[in-house]
Image (cartoon, rainbow, N blue to C red):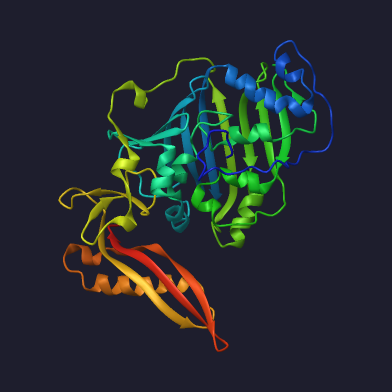
Amino acid sequence: MKTARHWRATAVLLLPALLGTAGCGTGDEAQAGEAVYGKPLAEQFQAATDATRDAGTAAFLSTLTYGAAGGDAVHRAEGTQDYERGTSLAKLGFSAHRHFPEETLKFLQEPPPEGGQAVATAEDDVYVRYGDSAWLKYTPEAVNVLGESTGVVAAHAAGDAAPYSGTLADLVPRVIPREKPERKTDGSRVYRVTALPEVAAELLPRDLQSLQGDWGADPVRLTVRLDPDGRLTSATADLGPVLARLHEQEVLVDVKRLRAEYRLSAFGKPMKGKGPDSGGRPVEDAVKVLAPVTTLKGGRCATTGDTGLGTTVVVRPVDCSERHDLRVLAQVKVDRTYPGKQDVRNGDRDARAQCVRAHAAETGDWMAKGLGFAGSSQVTYSTAQGRTETTVTGDYTCYVRSS
């Protein structure tokens, strides 16, 4: 989601053009919430965001629910936020019904970390912790050093709408209501609006976002509720149009419903839990303890489950006598010329073949582990005597990873 403070390499731009349901009006004025409901209708969501921040603190729950015939699976983030300090503390989790489709479950869920995952934010910095481990601190510098894979963490850095980003709270102030809200007996208001699917798609995990470049034009329906004081208390989004585009890519085909939800409560109450500033646990700098796997030489070992990134692109190097789940086999180079105009995938195929040979030569317990490789190639084209040739060059790292 776009925020004023998000990291440059991972910031995601929201399109300003958002759709609204038909109709117009200025809404009913009330003594409570006058700063919000007394505004023109088109300005009320921005005013509601300001009113929510003025509460000082709040508890939040954000969920993304994948509905299938066998039951639901849910990504969940629950915690507290301090708007004035720009900090948050949240517990992340994933759960699934026992009859949720197994293959889809494997696609959605990395092996669960021991003790669960906690995420804290302090303006531009994001901290990740598993169980009783130290806090791992990601600063904006980490983007430049460790690469774009840090975007899964950067997405939660404090933003304009809330100290914990990547939720419907970021979307609401970007939507312009067009239809007079429903007023409840307690003075709260319920708005029904729509947003462009490419904007709503940014509620998805980053690996799902990258699978589709065109999210179509079918609007995504949102329901937004403000309390009598004009503060945001809940927002829901039916992501059916987004899911339909994923189905076209043969992704999440067993998922029939996709829904995002965000709830706020306990306004003005003290934050619960101990963050990285409490001094209870040590803090490690991600730039100092992590490294791109492509920088590790053959024979080096690393862990992948405690980085918060869910990838093997960036790992924590460790001595092979310590607990680890990845071992580098070799560094390989690609440098081949092909007739005609080819694409960069030839480099990947050549690297994979070299990694397979390196794996076959491996002995010991690691020889039966899963083989992977990381790296990239570039292509150059040349033409001589009317013939075009493609030269593919690149550097790759071959590794094996325990399952």
**Which residue is the extreme one toward the bottom?**
385
In this picture, residue 44 sits left or right of residue 161: right
Residue at image location 49% in from the left, 73% down from the top = 380
* Depth check, front residue: 274 or 193: 274
Q: Quadrant of the N terminus?
A: top right
Residue at x 35% of width, y 37% of height: 116
Whether residue 107 is situated above or below residue 283 in the rendered picture: below
Q: Can you name the residue that lies furthest to the front here?
A: 385
- The image quadrant of residue 245 is bottom right
Q: Compared with residue 337, is residue 125 higher up or lower down, i.e. above or below? A: above
275 or 131: nearer the eye?
A: 275
Residue in the foreground of this view, choosing between 28 and 285: 285
Horizontal side of 128 relative to 17 (left or right) equals left
Residue plotted at (46% across, 44% down): 152
Residue 69 appears in the rendering: no
Which quadrant holds the C terminus?
Answer: bottom left
297 over 19 or under it: above or below? below
Relative horizontal placement of residue 360, taking residue 13 as reference (left or right): left
Q: How many numbered dots are placed on residues in this image? A: 0
Can residue 107 be seen from the camera position used here? Answer: yes
Measured as percent of width and height from the top left, residue 311 is found at 38, 52
User: Where residue 18 sits: x, y (%)?
Assistant: 73, 41
Residue shown at 41% from the left, 71% from the top: 393
Placement of 356 over or under 248, stated as above or below = below
On the image, the x and y values in percent for residue 32 come to 70, 12
State the residue lying farthest toward the top: 31
Instruction: Give how far across and how far down residue 8 sits, in percent.
Output: 52, 42
Along the line of sight, the residue nearer the viewer: 21 or 173: 173
